[in-house]
Amino acid sequence: MFLSQSDWRSSLRQRILNVTPPDFDALGLDLFRYQARYNAVYAEYLRHLRCQPNSIESLADVPFLPISFFKTHRILIPDVPVATEFASSGTTGATTSRHLVPDLPLYDAVCQRLFENTYGPLNQFHILGLLPSYLERNNSSLVYMVQRFMTLSGSDQSGFFLNNYAELTSRLRLLTTQARQRTQPAKKILLIGVTFGLLDWVDETPESLTWVGKYPDLIVMETGGMKGRRHEMLREEVHAELIGKLGVSAIHSEYGMTELLSQAYSTGAGVFGPGATIQVRLRDLNDPFHSYVPGQTTGKQTGGVNVIDLANLDSCAFIETQDLGQYETGSGTFRIMGRFDNSDVRGCNLLAAL
């Protein structure tokens, strides 16, 4: 049966909102066929690769669009009105990526589901955002997401902190003290921050912050990124420094970027799990068109990071990033190891090159 573009999109959207792990591959293939037909940039890319979309029968054979196209092209399926435009942070004078987003309610629903599947309902949190470089812009997808989380938290103590570290420390003291004085279960606390912001906070606070780790329902989450503010560090080094100075047992991480509408989360040790709408497929370092299927490799396979993001319904769901990743043995989990040489320094997804 022939479906119009709008009916096809509507069907895919509903399936994305309700996708479960057994449905992922079939939905991904249908989304590929939809985008191969209606996304002019992606269709032209496939044509240059001599890829016949009707011959693709497995996600392992789907070509991934280089992420740099988001800097140079309008990656958008036509006839879908744009609601907002997210842009990457970039560096001074650098060309930034643009992600045109027609469907903010889809983005809202996906972000909420991915977070709550890992951490529980947002209305059980106070959310503190330490995102200085992102707050200085008005088109950051990260700020939009965290602001949305704050609204869903329903907490009047949730809020952003630019460079006001003393106020952040004071807010944390207030929340942890109030929690200890209550007899009923208190809300959890999520402190989410860009990496250099968290490091600046612990370095520039004159008092010891090890009391922070004594509150068991506190999550400290880094989003990656030095943005030229500090020297690059391995994620393990960053986590070790923050754990030592905050007294927490683990540092959590968020893996996301402007070009993706889904996020992956690590609850510690930098190990990310796939989410309902996002999977990572590593590609061979010497052959970008050969990928390794998660859970079907032996040893800790390293490769370039390709991302399947089902939430990218109106742009492109198959993104070849410039990140380097590594599968954990025999599982669908992965680590982000660094970036390819000469790739752009980005704010949200990488800490250091190998």
Image: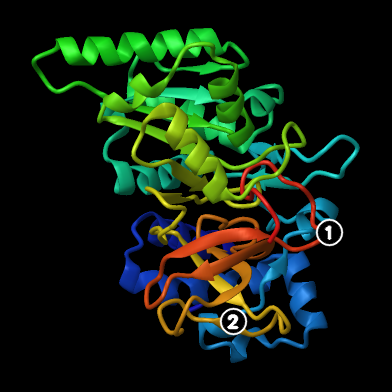
Tell me residue 123's x, y (percent).
Answer: 28, 27
Read off the residue under disc 2: 291
Under circle 2, the secondary element is strand
Query: Residue at coordinates 65% horizontally, 58% vertically from top-left?
Result: 338
Which comes sooner in the sequence, label 2 or label 1? 2
Position of 255 compared to 333: left or right? right
Label number found at residue 342: 1
User: In the picture shown, does residue 36 fall above or below 88?
Assistant: below
Amino acid type, residue under disc 2 in the picture: Ser
User: In the picture shown, does residue 46 fall above or below 74?
Assistant: below
Position of 331 compared to 184: left or right? right
Amino acid type, residue under disc 1 in the picture: Asn
Under circle 1, the secondary element is loop
User: In the picture shown, does residue 289 fall above or below 7?
Assistant: below
Quarter the C terminus occupies: bottom right
**Residue 33 appears in view:** no
Question: Comparing marks 2 and 1, which lies closer to the viewer?
Answer: 1
Q: How many marks?
A: 2
Query: Residue at coordinates 46% horizontally, 28% vertically from top-left?
Result: 245
